[in-house]
Structure formats: structure tokens, C-alpha cells
Image: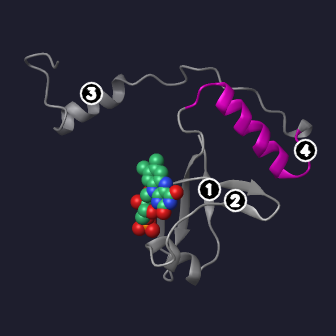
Amino acid sequence: MNEPDAPAPSSPAGFTGLLHAQRVWENELPSFDPAAAPDAPLPLFHTWFAEAVAAGQVEPHAMALATADADGLPDVRTLLLHGADGRGFHFASHATSAKGHQLAARPSAALGFY
Ligand SMILES: Cc1cc2nc3c(=O)[nH]c(=O)nc-3n(C[C@H](O)[C@H](O)[C@H](O)COP(=O)(O)O)c2cc1C
């Protein structure tokens, strides 16, 4: 329930108030020593994924996939990871989607996991 005089959550002031009320760094992040990291990134990703699962992270296999279109304009969306192995990071989607067209034009992408 909102306070009677509180701005509506859909208003700019309501949004800003809600945004600033959110807690940050509530969970202590694990430390990371780059010098102790394995030479290849995949085992490190597998380890981090297991730690995210163990920590109770909601949908740890959800990831942001960033691509760029033929003009270089960026795009990003959420996908589910289907696998991560020596061939790369796997996801399922449609070749006719925006991301499908973008990857056909520019076969490079970035992934982000929380
Ligand atoms: C939690 C979550 C998981 C998703 N997983 C997939 C997925 O695995 N594959 C997919 O094509 N779209 C998935 N989507 C939908 C995409 O975010 C996106 O809306 C859709 O693929 C169209 O993207 P595009 O128009 O940029 O190509 C997911 C959305 C959410 C919220």
C-alpha cells in the first residue's frame, strides 16, 4: 500500500523514490583474485555458475545477450543459457528474430550474467 500522499509509482517522483529505496550490495560479493584464475575462461564460468546456484541466485542461467545491427546500433535482450562448452555459449532462438538478423550481419556478441 502507498502512503496517502506518496506520489504514484508510475509518476517520475514515485519511480525515483522507489528506485532510491532499493538496497544495494545487500549480499557480500565473493572476492576475485585474477592471478589465481585459470588460464581458460570456461572452467571459471562453470565455477562461478555453480557458486551462483549455491547462493540461491534466481534464474542464474538467465543472461543478457548484446548484439549490434548492420549499422552498428546496439541491442540487448534476456535469454536462457542452454550450454557452455568448448564450442561456446549455447542458446535457443529464431533465426528470423532481430537477434538472428543481427548475428547474421555481425557474428559477434557479448553476454552478461548476474
Ligand atoms: C527470463 C527470460 C528468458 C528468455 N529466454 C529466451 C530464450 O531462451 N530464447 C529466446 O529466443 N528468447 C527468450 N526470451 C525472450 C527474449 O528476451 C526476447 O524478447 C526475444 O527473444 C526477442 O528478441 P529480439 O527481438 O531482440 O531478437 C526470454 C525472455 C525472458 C524474460
Mark 2: give few (<14), some (14-19) or many (20+) Cα within 10 Å.
few
Apparent side of residue 110 relative to residue 43 in the rendered image (left or right): left
Which amino acid, by three-letter code, is at mark 4? Pro
Foreground of the two, 73 or 45: 45
Q: Residue at x 90, y 39 (%)?
A: 35
Label 3's element? helix
Split into 4 quadrants, where in the image is the C terminus? top right
- Looking at the image, is mark 3 or mark 4 nearer the viewer? 4
Q: Which mark is residue 111?
A: 1
Q: SS class of the residue under badge 2? A: strand
**First in sequence: mark 3 or mark 4?**
3
Which of discs 3 and 2 lies nearer the camera? The answer is: 2
* Residue 2 rendering spot, x and y as whole percentages: 16, 20
Residue located beneath label 3 in the image: 17
| Amino acid bearing label 3 | Gly
Please give the count of numbered marks on the rendered protein. 4
Where residue 81 sits in the image (x, y, percent)?
61, 52
Say which residue appears at 77% left-offset and 43% top-offset.
Answer: 46
Q: Magenta segment, which residues?
A: 37-57
Identified by mark 2, the residue type is: Phe
Residue 89, numbered label = 2
Determine which of the numbered discs, if any, sits on residue 38 in the image: 4
Q: Nearer the viewer, residue 30 or 20?
A: 30
Of 12 and 56, the residue lying toward us: 56
